[in-house]
Amino acid sequence: MKYIRSSGVLMHPTSLPGKYGIGTLGKEAIKFIDFLILSGQKYWQILPLGPTGYGDSPYSSYSSVAGNPLLIDLDTLVNQGLLLESDLIDLQLPEGEVDFQQIQSTKLEILQKAFDNFSFSSDDLLKIKFENFCIANSFWLNDYSLFVCLKKHHKLQSWLDWSDDFRKRNPEALHRFVSENFHAINYQKFLQFLFFQQWHEIKSYANKNEVKIIGDIPLYVALDSVDAWSNPVLFQFDEDLKPEFVSGVPPDYFNSDGQLWGNPLYNWESMRKDGFSWWVNRIKNNLLLFDIIRFDHFRGLCAYWSVPAGDKTARNGKWINAPGMELFTEIQNQLGDIPIIAEDLGMITPDVVELRTKFNLPGMKILEFAFDSGEDNDYMPHSFTRNSVVYTGTHDNNTVVGWYEGIAPHDKKLLFDYLDIDDAKIHRDGIHWIFIRLALSTVSNICIIPAQDLLGKGAAARMNFPGTASGNWKWRMKTHELNKEMAKKLRFITNLYGRLHGR
């Protein structure tokens, strides 16, 4: 797919401001889109929207299809008559980082009240919409809602530790559980109904104003997910449904143990037999949510690091080939030319470049990487190609300000020489605006700026530290930080470098 010259902002919905402790799909999301419109941006990039599990990571979700109930906007439910304004008074919190544990308990409690009100409501139209949603999405919604209720039944244990009847999906046991827990299962379906109703309103508003959504597909699913529980034949499990091998990345200069991610690995042979239908359906579902898909850990579709299950590090893993070429050929045959961005960071081999090039997929360029390894790397701006997406940094990197504060002296010299700048210019203009201007000026067709870099935030605003399981994904913007003056400045630079009208 060919992309016109344009730009956008990376901001996960949880990072939006608001009075209930976490960003939601309500008026602040609309205001953010208004900022994008005012500043001449054409894209809103987000992280995965699924319900998060351990560590609150959007990249470790209970489902590859479902939405995160914590993103449901409560004020919208008041407008729908499902809650009263008085119900929300005690939920208001001062602006600050997301406290996921607190939000999880308080928000799900009030959402339960909304469901109870819905159950006794006389709003027949809303009930018809809910019933239609359940029918249209039954292919994933039934299993997901059952999975969540079974987790609660087993005190949130992983499905691998459930009793055999439920772990191995005994039909009689599942039928009995559904009959005995009909209301609780319907509540989970209701949460998904609200999420998707609100998300489609947000996406519709964005699209009507010529703003496209870039969404994220993690390569792997979580081990403790409905995907793994309901489709064990698609993963490298033994006869007792225990993983034989798990995901990770090999040791490198920075980490002698590598990184042990622990996701279940795909049984590619099993997937190949039915024409990769699970993948085709996953892509199809995500295209209902997003206009463009960023494919995380793209290189794992060419070869993946396979670690024996039970190992404490990723040292003993090995590279195994994956059928990425076959997969994308099948996706293209069934769905046509799909708008995909390939996250091709890390150890990139010729087969990764070949796969990306074969399907004309833009790769990623990170400006922070340009000045860490000298001039002879693929991230120096003069080496970019048009079919790429340039970022100042990503959710896995430090903010530009935080990065600059920790830069090594020889890298700082390279930065100064390359951009012909000095300390005085950085003090006057701000390193973040220098990087934003550099990113917008590159030949890359798409430029994405993290919101933290627009705001000039330091290291405390970093979204994620890869390899750490807690303390991430908490950053939130404060109300009115993205103001008209900033929009005007961003629009001017966007227009200056030919991104306002796709020149």
Image (cartoon, rainbow, N blue to C red):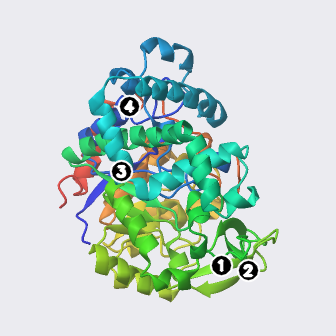
Image height of 32 relative to 44, above or below: above
Q: Amino acid at mark 3?
A: Ile
Residue visible at 36% across and 50% down in the picture: 135
Does dot 3 land on a helix, a strand or a loop? helix
Q: Is residue 330 visible?
A: yes
Report the Cα–Cα distance between label 2 and label 4: 45 Å
Query: Quadrant of the image for the N terminus?
Result: bottom left
Query: Which residue is the site of mark 2?
Result: 317
Q: Residues within 10 Å of mark 1 (few under 14, many from 20)?
A: many
Does dot 2 land on a helix, a strand or a loop? loop
Residue visible at 55% across and 76% down in the picture: 300
- Mark 3 against mark 2, which lies toward the viewer? 3
User: How many labels sit on residues?
Assistant: 4
Along the line of sight, the residue nearer the viewer: 359 or 406: 359
Along the line of sight, the residue nearer the viewer: 459 or 344: 344
Q: Position of residue 86 (x, y in %)?
A: 47, 11
Q: Could you tell which of marks 3 and 2 lies nearer the N-terminus? A: 3
Q: Could you tell which of marks 2 and 1 lies nearer the N-terminus? A: 1
- Mark 1 against mark 3, which lies toward the viewer? 3
Query: Which residue is the site of mark 3?
Result: 135
Q: Is residue 35 visible?
A: no
Do labels 4 and 3 touch, CB within 8 Å?
no
Q: Could you tell which of marks 2 and 4 lies nearer the N-terminus? A: 4
